[in-house]
Image (spheres, helix red, strand yellow):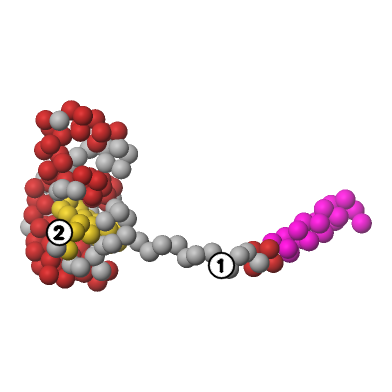
Amino acid sequence: MSTNAHKFACLLLILSGVPLALAQAPANRPPPPPRARGPALAVAVQAAQIAVATCKEHGYKTTALIVDSADVPVVLLSGDGVFALSQTIAATKAAAAIRYRMSSGEVANKAKTDAALAAQITGDPKIGTARQGALLLKAGDDIIGALAVSGAPGGDKDEACAQAAIDKVKDQLQ
């Protein structure tokens, strides 16, 4: 057998054992934990759709992002024609709201007068810049996530669309 043929045969033997080795991996591993507490998927989808539709009624092309209480995305909807960066900006707004347990607009306002907070925000790769447009989702007094909107000409308009959506689904948040 030639050297190349021998190498090929050895490689086949080695590779043929890989699926067997993987199949014998311990089956007693616990499943990964579920995501953190957050809005039900149907409610999150509905809220995101309402936020995008509300902004569209005012002529704004936006993205709506719903995250759970650990800032893990549940729903991301980008309206037709919205700029792609709005997805990233929505994520920074949601991260600020979840981290500081207040609307991202409140975070932005506090950062204007609190240099330590501003430095902390700037140094946080998930936030970077505090912007208005994300509101907390609550079930009673418990924070279960955030709804962030991005793409309107101003965070106040983004926040108004988020608030309209929350107002319509708040009784369904658990």
Is residue 37 shown left or right of residue 170? right
Give residue 131's quadrant in the image. Answer: top left
Which residue is tagged 1?
28
Residue type indicated by callout 2: Asp
Identity of the residue drawn at 16% across and 71% down: 172
Is residue 89 shown left or right of residue 60? right
Q: Is residue 64 visible?
A: no
Identify the secondary structure beneath mark 2: loop
Q: Is residue 171 visible?
A: yes
Q: Nearer the viewer, residue 154 or 119?
A: 119
Which residue is tagged 2?
141
Identity of the residue drawn at 26% across and 56% down: 69
Q: Position of residue 106 (x, y in %)?
A: 12, 43
Q: Nearer the viewer, residue 10 or 82?
A: 10
- Quadrant where the C terminus sits is bottom left
Looking at the image, tell me whether mark 1 or mark 2 is earlier in sequence order. 1
